[in-house]
Image: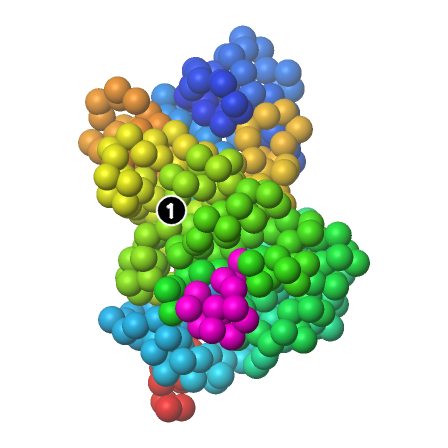
Amino acid sequence: MNIRFTNVKILTMEPGREIFDGELHVKDDRIVYVGPTVQEAVDPVWDREIDGEGNLLMPGFKNAHAHSGMTFLRSYADDLPLHEWLNDRVFPMEAKLTPEMIYHLTKLAILEYLTSGITAAADMYLTPDTIARAAADCGFRMVLVGAVNDFSQSVEEMERCYEVYNHYHPLVSYQLGFHAEYTTGRERLEAIADLAARKKAPVFTHNSETKAEVEGCIERNGMTPTVYLEKLGMFRYGGGGYHCVHMSPEDLDIFAEHSLYAITNPASNLKLASGIAPVEEFLQRGIPVAIGTDGPASNNCLDMFREMFLVTALAKYRENDASAVDAGKVLRMAAVGGAGSMGLSDCDILAAGKQADLILIDLHQPNMQPINHIVKNLVYSGSKSNVALTMIAGKILYERGSFFIGEDPEAIYAKANEITRRLGDAQ
């Protein structure tokens, strides 16, 4: 479709470019014009012209770490320590899942992403085949991440997925990854490092999420997870770590040296009492940062606005410095940083030639008034209620409470509840 947005404020997220009043044109899946209002549009034939009513157009948020199919565990295993939560509650329930169940459960997460202005997610979960199908069927942009460990998936399977899902659908791509050091033996880790070297590809994993994880790795290997993986050659072509809460100075040096992404998940880390990531230190060392929600079993809300507020508020608390990690940096993490970590260089900013992955933010709500500073409003007072429209690849998938993904949301909710009941009955 050809769509023209007029009468909008535009935040392109290009470095040094301020918010301005203007318009934006979309042809098919691409942005073709971003700039001042034009008296006569370049192409007068539009499928739709949208009067933005002075609201804000900006790039969509990128959820840089998620386990979408875990929607069935929302509010199921709360208020437990991480390792008990994972080993005693989550893993046993996940063992009962079928690929088709994960297909439907992923659709539920996609609906929630759209309401939060999230236009892409990096999804590390059990059945990439059905996750990819769910994303393609809904029109959602999904970056699949390998989840190799000693219990599920294999390095050979991950290599197959890498080849298949980087050529499967325009909205789907694949990155190498494994669950964590503590669930993956050395032989598999070495095989993953070899695969990354052959493909010249980045690798992603859960890293230094808890103090116990780090202490366990030191006891097993005589070094922290980051140092251990670096010595195995895991990060020769980049990548990153999810959580990165308990990081030593040497860990930070390694992340800076290899330009590894630190992908912070503040709500999940707080809820599981894992700790507060040293985000200010990441920034001071030039380590790129992105933001993820983690899964709905540990968060339980897939809401980028809540994550953004927590990133900056927790950094200020941790550093005892109210100026730490300002709102502009956080907003950039949520959009541009996430795109970088996920390999979505075509989806980072609003510019001619880029993918039309964008959101319209309703500024005509009490929490956005008065407009002293839009960026600070977004991070400190914004909420999902401000997302008026979410577009991916030029298609509007969500607009003012309505979804356009080719399926009735109520049917998705009903299916998710049916699966959850079925899994509960199987206990």
Q: Please give the range of residues in magenta.
A: 213-226
Number of other residues with Cα within 10 Å of mark 1, as a class: few under 14, some 14 to 19, many 20 or more? many
**Considering depth in this image, is 11 or 265 the residue closer to the camera?**
265
Question: Helix or strand or loop: what does disc 1 sit on?
Answer: loop
**Looking at the picture, how far across and down is residue 329, in whole percent?**
41, 32
**Considering depth in this image, is 404 or 302 the residue closer to the camera?**
302
**Looking at the picture, does residue 281 appear above or below residue 275?**
above
Who's the residue at 50% across and 52% down the image? 251
- Image quarter in which the N terminus is found: top right
How many dots with numbers?
Answer: 1
**Looking at the picture, does residue 213 appear above or below residue 332?**
below
Indicate left or right for 97 with 204 as reference: left
Is 224 in the magenta? yes
Which residue matches tag 1?
A: 278
Who's the residue at 32% across and 57% down the image? 275
**Looking at the picture, how far across and down is residue 241, in whole percent?**
52, 55
Who's the residue at 36% across and 80% down the image? 89
**Residue 400 appears in the figure:** no
Indicate left or right for 316 with 13 as reference: left
**Looking at the picture, how far across and down is residue 351, in whole percent?**
59, 25
**Considering depth in this image, is 352 or 187 the residue closer to the camera?**
187
Which quadrant holds residue 377? top left
Indicate left or right for 385 with 64 as reference: left
Picture colour scheme: rainbow
**Looking at the picture, does residue 94 appear above or below residue 39?**
below
Is 160 in the magenta? no
**Looking at the picture, how far across and down is residue 336, in whole percent?**
52, 36
